[in-house]
Amino acid sequence: MRKLTKLGSKINSSIGRAINDYGLISTGDKILVAVSGGKDSLTLLHLLKKIKGWAPVEFSLIAAHITTDFHCGDEMIDKEIEKFFLSEGVEYVFRHLNIKNERGVNCFWCSWTRRKALFKIAEEFSCNKIALGHHKDDIAETVLLNLIYKGQISGMNPYQEMFKGKIALIRPLCYAEESDIRTFAKEMGFKIKTCNCA
């Protein structure tokens, strides 16, 4: 396993701080990592696997990659992302969703359907947490968009319980900056293809 670069160590430390500040990971957790094939999710899975090796708590990871018949950009093909999963040594699952219908499909519907599928996969594999690759910039942008378009201050929480605590969404990259993640992904040579909204 490759040694972390200086930038990788910086992002890794920010994840560790987020885990500590928000209680994102506990002993016994089984975490489903949503991997789109973009820089954020590839970085998240790679660094969570690193953290798993030294963390004082024991937890397990399973990666999920979901594709649909709606495309708004280049998606990473299954063979490419399977190679990444195998190189990381993690359990993984693929799902393909047919979501096109006579009413047409947009990015919101595609995103909502993928999120619903993640919850189903988490239940199927007895995962109690789903890790998403949202970083600090995503969270800040969401707050601004909600303020401008909805007139309210709200955003994405680093830790968010769903379904009366049955499962939780966690965002370990909440302290990491997008520019750092982009540079790190290039340093690592991650082969990145994703849809425009990922």
Image (cartoon, rainbow, N blue to C red):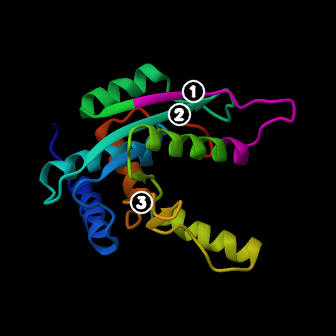
Q: Quadrant of residue 12?
A: bottom left
Q: Quadrant of the N terminus?
A: top left
Q: Amino acid at mark 1?
A: His
Mark 2 closeness class: few <14, some 14–19, many ≥20 residues within 10 Å: some
* Disc 2 to disc 1: CB gap under 8 Å: yes
Residue shown at 65% from the left, 47% from the top: 112
Tell whether position 132 is magenta: no
Label number found at residue 170: 3
Q: Residue tagged by mark 2?
A: 66
Rounded to the nearest whole Å, what is the CA distance between mark 2 and mark 3?
18 Å
Report the side of 81 relative to 49 (left or right): right
As drawn, 58 above or below 46: below
Report the side of 8 relative to 101 (left or right): left
Residue 162 coordinates in the image, percent (x, y): 52, 61
Name the N-terminal-most of marks 2 and 1. Answer: 2
Residue 194 coordinates in the image, percent (x, y): 54, 36
Of residue 164 and residue 83, the one placed in the foreground of this image is 164
Name the N-terminal-most of marks 2 and 3. Answer: 2
Q: Residue tagged by mark 1?
A: 96
As drawn, 96 above or below 25: above
Q: Which residues are magenta?
A: 93-110
Q: Quadrant of residue 85?
A: top left
Rounded to the nearest whole Å, what is the CA distance between mark 2 and mark 1?
6 Å
Residue shown at 71% from the left, 48% from the top: 108
Element at label 3:
strand
Q: Amino acid at mark 3?
A: Ile
